[in-house]
Image: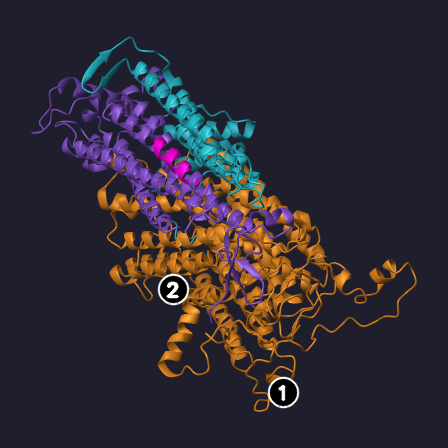
Chain colours: A orange, B purple, C cyan
C-alpha cells in the first residue's frame, strides 16, 4: 500500500504554537503511519485504518492500545473502589448488602490486579520504550507482542463475563478454598480469565528478555542500559517463573469445582492451605511485577529531573534483580495465620526482612541522585517525589506486617489494606502517571498542561494520603478487611468517613490527569524533540514522536544512559567542565535550553551501517 | 511492486569475503540491498534472529517446567503426608504399559532430533519421514493412554470425590473431621504417655478404623465388570487425592502431546513443500525443543507415578 | 553442499549452529533405554512381584526403604541430563540457554522446599512444652497456667471502649509482676458475666 510521505501540515490554518516549526516536522509519525492511501475513502478507508491498528506489529502502537485498555480497566476498578468506600461511610448498610459488597471488593481486586496493574507499566511504557531505549527497531517477536494484547483482551472478557453471570465473584481476589470451591458465583469464568491473562503476561516477559539479551545496539553494554530496562528485565524474569504456577493453580481450582478432584478439599483428604501456597507462590512475586517497573520509571525521572546521573547505577540495577529473585522466597508471609508451621513462618518472616534491603538501597540512591543536582520540579518530578514518600511508608509498613508476631494481630485488618495500597497505588500508580507525563511528549508529540499537571499531582497526593493513612490507624485498632459493616466499632465511623472523602479527592485528582491527557491531545502544544533535556536514547536518537521504524540507522552507543557531563559539558555550574578542562574556569555558558523547538533528534548520535538502513529523507 | 529476487549460488563466496548466504533466497529490500528472505526487518542478521528465537523458546520451556512443576509439588507434599496411599495406588498403574510408553516417547525424541538433523543436512526426506515417525509414536502414546484410562474408568478409579471406594469404607468427612494432617514429628506417642491418647490422637482412631475396614472388606468386589478391583487402595479413603494428581498430571501432559502432534503435523506439511533447509529451519528446532520437554516431563512422571 | 557430514560445527558462516551427530544421537537413545530398563527393574525388584503380560513373578524384594525415591529420581534426572544435553543440544549451546533451564528448575525446588517446610513441621508448636527465656515470660506462663485451671472468662463485649486509654476492667495485667492483681482480675471477670 502506498504511504504518505508529505506530512499534513496545516500550519497555515492553525496558530503557530499548534504546529511544528516549518521544516522541522517529524517526517514519519508512528501514529499516522502506516495508514490507508489517500485515494481510499469511506468505509474502505475506515476498515483499512482499523486494520492498520488491529493488525499492527509496531510495538509503539501496541503500547498505546494497552494504555487505552489499562486506563479503562483502571477506571472500572476505581469505580468499584469508590463503591466500597461509600458502603463503609456509615455503620450498617449504606448502599449495598453484604453479598453485593463481597462481590464489589472482589471484583475491585481482580480488575485492579489482573486487568490493570500487572500489565500496566510493562505493557504500556515497557512496550513503547524498550526497543527505542536499546536502539532496536522493534521487540524480538512483534507478532507475539500483538498476540499478547489479544490474549489479554480475551482473558479480560472472561473475567468480566462473571459480572454478567453472577454479578461478579465474591471470594476475594485470592480465591481461597474451600469457599471458592463451594460458592455459587462465577469462579470458573474469572479463574479462566486470569489463566488466559497469565499467558499474555508470559509472552510479554519472553519478548522483553529476548529483546534485551539479543537486540541491544552496538555499544550498548549491560552497564549502559537505562535503569528502566534493568527493572523491566527483572520484571520479565518474575513473569516467566511465577505466572505458570498461578495458571495451573487456577486450573486446579476449576477442576475442583467441576469434578471435585479434592486436592484442596479437606473432606477428601486434601488441604486448603496447599491452595494458599500455590496461589501465593505466584501472587507474591506478582507484587514485584507490579513495583519493579515502577522503580525503573522513578530511576529515569530522578535522573532527568535532577539533571544528573542516578547515583549508584550498579546498586540500583542489581537490586532490581535481587528483589526479583528474593521475591520468590517470601510468599508465606501472607499465610502466617493460616495454620502454617511455625518453622516455615519464621523462615518466611526472616527473608521478608531481607528483601527490604534492596528496596532501601534504591530509595537511598534516588534521594542521593538529587544531591547537588539541578532539581526541576515539573509534574513528573512531583509524582516521583510523591512516590519516594509514599513507597517508603508502604515499604516500611510492609516490614511491619512481615514481622511474624505483629502480623498475627494485623493480618486481615485495614493495616494490610493500607500497606498494599501505599505500595501499589502510591508506588506503581504514581510512577505510572509520572512516567506517562514524562514520556507523553514522546508518545503523542504534544505537551500536557503543566499547571493542571502540577495541580493533579498535589491533589492525588493529598487525596491518597487522606484515604489510606487513616486506614493504618483503623486497621491497627482492629477494623477487619473485607467487612461491609463494623457494628461493634461504631466509633470508627468518622475515620471511615474521612477515608471515603479522601477517595473522592483522589478520584478528582485522577480525573484531572485524564482531563489533562484529553486536553493535550486536542489542544496541546506540539512537543519539541527533547523537552526535558534527557540523554537516554529515546530522547537523543529518535524523533518525537518516533518514526514507525524507530531508527533508520542503528545508533552506536558511546556513552552511558545518564552521562549529562558527556553530552552537555558546558551546562551545570561549570565545575565538572572546569575540572575536565584542567582548572581554568570556563565562561559560564548557559545550559542549553531543553526546549529545542524541533521534532528531530537533538543530538547527532553516531550510527552504524549494518545493512539494514532505509532511506531517510531528513538525512 | 514485485521485489526482484536474487539467488546467491556460490558456496565459496563466503571464503572469498562474500556474504555467506549460499543457496539462500535473497530479496532486494527498500534500501536496494540484499537481505535473506527469511530475515525479519527488526533483526540485523539471520544469526541474531535464530539465537533470539531459540532463547525465546527456552524461556517458554521454563514456563512449562514451572507449570508441571507445581503439580509435582502437590504430588510431593501429599506423598510426604500419606506414603502408604502412594504405595497402594501405584499398584493400580500398569508398569509394563508405562514403561512401554516411556520407550515410545524416548524413541519419538530420537526421531525428532533426527528430523532436525535432516533439516540441518538439507535432507528433506529424512526431515519429513522423521517428523511423521514422531507423530506416529506420539499417537501410539496417546492410544496406550486411552486404554489405560479406559480400564481405570471401568473399575471406578476416578479423581477426587468420584473415586469409587469399596462399600463401607468411611470417607474422610464421615470421620467427623478428626483426621488432621499427620505430622512428621509425631507427638501422639508423647501425648499417649501423658494419658491424652485417644482424645487428642485422631490418627490412632483413624488407623484403627482404616485397618478394620481393610480387614473386613477383602472381597468387596461389587463392581459388575470388575475383576480389576484388587488392592488396598479401594479402601483407602484418600485414594481420590492420588488419582486426582495422577489424572491432572497425565491429562495435562497428554494435552501437551496433542498440541505437539498438531505442531509437528504442520511442520511435516510445510517440510513436504520444501519450506525448511539448512539455511532456515528455526520452527523445526523450536518444536523439537518443545517436544523434548514433553518427553522430559514424562521421564519424571513415569517413575513417580508408576514405579515408586 | 559443503557441510561436513559428521557433526562438526558448520564453518560456512552460520556460526553457532551445531549439527547433530548421528552417532551421538544413537548413543544417547541407547543410554536412555538402558536407564529406563534399569529403573523399571529396580522398581519391580523393590516391590517383590511383577505382572508382565499376564505372567506373575515373585522374588525376594530388595529392601531400600526410603531410598527408593532418591534412586528413582536420580535415574530420572540422569535421563533428563542426557535428553537435555544431547537431544536438546544444551551441551553445545551458549550458557544463557542452560541457565534458563537450570534456573527454572531451581525455582521449582525452592517452591517444593519451602512448602515442605510447612507441611513437615505442622503441629510442632506445643505451647505446653515451650520454654520461655526470661523471668517475665516465666511469670506470665505461670499466671496463665493458674488461670487456665479456672473456667475461662466469658467474652465480654465492651462497646465504647477507649482504645487509646487504659485497658478495660477485667483485662489481664500485662506484666507478671502484678501477680496478685492478675489473680484478682481473673476473679473479677469470672464474677461479671
Q: Which residue is mark 2?
A: A80
B26 displayed left or right of A573:
left
Most frequent secondary structure within the magenta stretch = helix
Label of residue B230 in the image: none
Is A443 within the magenta?
A: no
Farthest residue, direction top = C60
Subunit of mark 2? A
Q: Earlier in the sequence, mark 1 or mark 2?
A: 1
Which residue is at a point 36% across and 64% down the rendered structure image? A87
Count all numbered tags in the image, as a single digit: 2
Farthest residue, direction right = A584
Visible residue check, residue B226: yes
At mark 2, the secondary structure is: helix
How far across and down, in percent of the image, does residue A304 sit?
A: 68, 63
**For residue C49, what is the image quadrant?**
top left
Q: Which residue is mark 1?
A: A16
Which residue is at a point 14% across and 25% down the rendered structure image? B228
- Same-chain check, marks 1 and 2: yes
Subunit of mark 1? A
Is B115 within the magenta?
A: yes
At mark 1, the secondary structure is: helix
Which residue is at a point 56% across and 87% down the rendered structure image? A10
B260 displayed left or right of A592:
left
Farthest residue, direction left = B224
Taking depth in this image into account, of A358 and A6 the one nearest to the observer is A6
* Part of the protein shown in magenta: B106-116
How far across and down, in percent of the image, does residue C171 sit?
A: 44, 41
Farthest residue, direction bottom = A13
B28 displayed left or right of A269:
right
Amino acid at each position: 500500500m502506498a504511504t504518505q510521505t508529505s506530512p499534513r501540515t496545516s500550519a497555515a490554518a492553525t496558530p503557530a504554537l499548534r504546529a511544528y516549526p516549518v521544516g522541522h516536522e517529524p517526517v514519519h509519525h508512528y501514529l499516522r503511519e502506516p495508514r490507508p492511501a489517500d485515494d481510499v475513502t469511506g468505509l474502505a478507508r475506515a476498515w483499512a485504518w482499523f486494520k492498520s491498528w488491529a493488525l499492527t506489529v509496531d510495538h509503539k502502537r501496541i503500547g498505546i492500545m494497552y494504555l487505552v485498555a489499562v486506563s479503562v480497566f483502571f477506571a472500572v476498578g476505581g469505580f468499584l473502589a469508590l463503591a466500597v468506600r461509600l458502603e463503609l461511610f456509615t455503620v450498617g448498610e449504606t448502599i449495598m448488602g453484604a453479598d453485593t459488597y463481597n462481590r464489589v471488593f472482589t471484583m475491585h481486586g481482580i480488575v485492579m490486579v489482573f486487568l490493570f496493574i500487572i500489565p500496566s507499566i510493562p505493557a504500556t511504557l515497557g512496550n513503547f520504550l524498550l526497543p527505542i531505549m536499546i536502539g532496536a527497531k522493534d521487540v524480538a517477536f512483534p507478532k507475539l507482542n500483538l498476540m499478547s494484547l489479544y490474549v489479554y483482551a480475551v482473558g479480560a472478557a472472561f473475567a468480566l463475563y462473571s459480572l454478567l453471570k453472577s454479578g461478579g465473584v465474591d471470594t476475594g481476589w485470592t480465591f481461597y478454598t474451600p469457599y471458592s470451591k463451594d460458592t455459587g458465583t462465577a469462579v470458573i469464568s474469572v479463574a479462566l480469565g486470569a489463566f488466559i491473562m497469565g499467558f499474555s503476561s508470559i509472552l510479554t516477559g519472553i519478548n522483553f528478555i529476548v529483546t534485551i539479551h539479543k537486540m541491544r545496539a552496538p555499544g550498548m553494554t549491560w552497564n549502559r542500559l537505562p535503569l528502566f530496562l534493568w527493572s523491566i528485565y527483572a520484571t520479565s524474569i518474575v513473569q516467566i517463573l511465577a505466572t505458570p504456577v498461578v495458571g495451573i493453580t487456577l486450573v486446579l481450582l476449576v477442576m475442583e469445582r467441576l469434578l471435585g478432584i479434592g486436592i484442596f478439599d479437606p473432606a477428601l483428604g486434601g488441604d486448603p492451605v496447599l491452595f494458599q501456597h500455590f496461589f501465593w507462590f505466584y501472587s507474591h512475586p506478582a507484587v514485584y511485577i507490579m513495583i519493579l517497573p515502577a522503580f525503573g520509571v522513578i530511576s529515569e525521572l530522578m535522573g532527568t529531573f535532577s539533571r544528573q546521573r542516578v547515583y549508584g547505577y550498579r546498586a540500583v540495577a542489581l537490586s532490581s534483580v535481587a528483589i526479583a529473585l528474593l521475591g520468590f522466597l517470601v510468599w508465606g508471609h501472607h499465610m502466617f495465620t493460616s495454620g502454617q508451621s511455625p518453622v516455615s513462618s519464621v523462615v518466611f518472616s526472616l527473608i521478608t526482612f531481607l528483601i527490604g534491603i534492596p528496596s532501601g538501597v534504591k530509595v537511598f540512591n534516588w534521594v542521593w541522585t538529587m544531591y547537588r543536582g539541578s532539581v526541576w520540579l515539573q509534574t513528573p518530578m512531583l509524582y516521583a517525589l510523591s512516590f519516594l514518600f509514599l513507597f517508603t511508608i508502604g515499604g516500611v509498613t510492609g516490614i511491619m506486617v512481615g514481622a511474624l508476631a505483629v502480623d498475627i494481630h494485623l493480618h486481615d485488618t485495614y493495616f494490610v489494606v493500607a500497606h498494599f495500597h501505599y505500595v501499589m497505588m502510591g508506588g506503581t500508580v504514581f510512577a505510572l502517571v509520572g512516567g506517562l507525563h514524562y514520556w507523553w511528549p514522546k508518545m503523542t508529540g504534544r505537551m500536557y498542561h503543566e499547571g493542571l499537571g502540577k495541580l493533579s499531582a498535589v491533589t492525588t497526593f493529598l487525596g491518597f494520603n487522606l484515604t489510606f493513612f487513616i486506614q493504618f490507624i483503623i486497621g491497627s485498632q482492629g477494623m477487619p478487611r473485607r467487612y461491609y459493616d463494623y457494628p461493634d466499632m461504631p466509633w470508627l465511623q468518622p475515620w471511615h468517613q474521612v477515608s471515603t472523602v479522601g477517595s473522592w479527592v483522589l478520584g478528582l485528582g485522577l480525573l484531572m490527569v485524564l482531563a489533562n491527557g484529553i486536553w493535550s491531545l486536542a489542544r496541546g502544544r506540539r512537543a519539541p524533540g527533547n523537552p526535558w533535556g534527557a540523554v537516554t536514547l529515546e530522547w537523543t536518537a529518535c524523533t518525537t514522536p518516533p518514526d514507525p521504524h524507530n531508527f533508520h540507522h542503528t545508533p552506536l552507543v558511546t556513552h552511558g544512559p545518564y552521562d549529562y557531563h558527556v553530552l552537555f559539558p558546558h551546562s551545570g555550574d561549570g565545575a565538572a567542565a572546569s575540572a575536565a578542562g584542567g582548572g581554568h574556569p570556563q565562561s559560564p555558558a548557559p545550559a542549553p535550553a531543553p526546549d529545542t523547538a524541533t521534532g528531530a533528534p537533538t543530538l547527532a548520535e553516531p550510527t552504524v551501517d549494518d545493512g539494514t538502513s532505509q532511506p531517510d529523507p531528513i538525512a | 511492486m514485485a521485489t526482484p529476487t536474487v539467488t546467491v549460488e556460490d558456496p565459496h563466496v563466503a571464503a572469498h569475503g562474500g556474504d555467506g548466504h549460499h543457496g539462500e533466497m535473497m530479496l532486494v529490500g527498500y534500501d536496494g540491498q540484499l537481505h535473506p528472505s527469511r530475515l525479519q526487518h527488526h533483526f540485523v542478521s539471520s544469526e541474531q534472529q535464530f539465537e533470539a528465537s531459540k532463547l525465546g523458546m527456552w524461556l517458554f520451556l521454563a514456563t512449562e517446567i514451572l507449570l508441571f512443576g507445581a503439580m509435582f509439588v502437590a504430588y510431593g507434599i501429599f506423598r510426604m503426608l500419606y506414603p502408604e496411599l502412594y504405595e497402594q495406588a501405584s499398584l493400580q498403574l500398569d508398569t509394563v504399559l508405562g514403561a512401554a510408553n516411556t520407550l515410545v516417547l524416548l524413541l519419538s525424541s530420537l526421531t525428532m532430533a533426527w528430523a532436525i538433523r535432516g533439516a540441518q543436512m538439507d535432507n528433506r526426506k529424512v526431515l519429513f519421514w522423521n517428523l511423521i515417525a514422531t507423530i506416529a509414536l506420539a499417537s501410539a502414546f496417546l492410544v496406550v493412554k486411552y486404554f489405560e484410562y479406559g480400564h481405570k474408568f471401568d473399575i471406578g478409579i476416578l479423581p477426587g470425590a468420584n473415586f469409587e471406594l469399596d462399600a463401607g469404607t468411611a470417607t474422610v468427612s464421615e470421620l467427623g473431621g478428626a483426621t488432621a494432617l499427620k505430622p512428621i514429628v509425631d507427638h501422639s506417642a508423647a501425648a499417649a504417655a501423658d494419658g491424652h491418647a485417644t482424645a487428642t490422637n485422631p490418627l490412632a482412631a483413624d488407623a484403627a478404623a482404616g485397618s478394620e475396614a481393610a480387614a473386613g472388606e477383602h472381597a468387596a468386589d461389587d463392581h459388575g465388570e470388575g475383576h480389576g478391583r484388587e488392592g488396598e487402595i479401594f479402601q483407602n479413603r484418600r485414594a481420590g487425592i492420588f488419582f486426582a494428581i495422577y489424572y491432572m498430571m497425565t491429562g495435562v501432559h497428554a494435552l501437551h502431546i496433542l498440541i505437539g502432534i498438531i505442531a509437528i503435523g504442520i511442520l511435516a506439511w510445510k517440510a513436504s513443500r520444501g519450506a525448511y533447509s539448512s539455511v532456515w529451519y528455526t520452527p523445526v528446532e523450536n518444536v523439537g525443543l518443545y517436544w523434548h520437554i514433553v518427553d522430559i516431563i514424562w521421564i519424571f512422571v513415569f517413575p513417580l507415578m508408576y514405579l515408586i | 553442499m559443503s557441510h561436513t557430514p559428521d557433526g562438526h560445527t558448520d564453518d560456512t558462516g552460520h556460526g553457532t549452529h551445531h549439527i547433530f551427530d548421528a552417532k551421538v544421537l544413537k548413543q544417547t537413545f541407547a543410554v536412555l533405554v538402558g536407564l529406563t530398563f534399569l529403573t523399571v527393574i529396580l522398581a519391580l525388584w523393590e516391590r517383590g512381584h511383577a505382572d508382565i503380560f499376564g505372567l506373575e513373578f515373585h522374588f525376594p524384594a530388595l529392601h531400600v526403604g526410603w531410598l527408593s525415591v532418591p534412586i528413582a529420581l536420580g535415574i530420572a534426572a540422569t535421563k533428563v541430563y542426557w535428553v537435555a544435553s544431547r537431544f536438546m543440544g544444551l551441551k553445545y549451546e551458549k550458557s544463557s540457554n542452560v541457565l534458563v533451564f537450570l534456573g527454572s528448575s531451581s525455582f521449582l525446588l525452592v517452591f517444593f522446599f519451602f512448602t515442605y517446610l510447612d507441611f513437615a513441621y505442622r503441629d510442632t508448636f506445643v505451647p505446653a512444652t515451650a520454654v520461655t527465656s526470661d523471668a517475665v515470660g516465666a511469670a506470665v506462663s505461670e499466671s496463665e497456667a493458674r488461670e487456665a485451671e479456672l473456667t475461662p472468662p466469658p467474652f465480654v463485649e465492651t462497646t465504647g471502649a477507649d482504645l487509646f486509654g487504659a485497658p478495660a476492667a477485667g483485662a489481664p495485667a500485662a506484666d507478671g509482676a502484678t501477680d496478685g492483681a492478675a489473680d484478682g482480675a481473673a476473679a473479677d471477670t469470672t464474677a461479671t458475666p
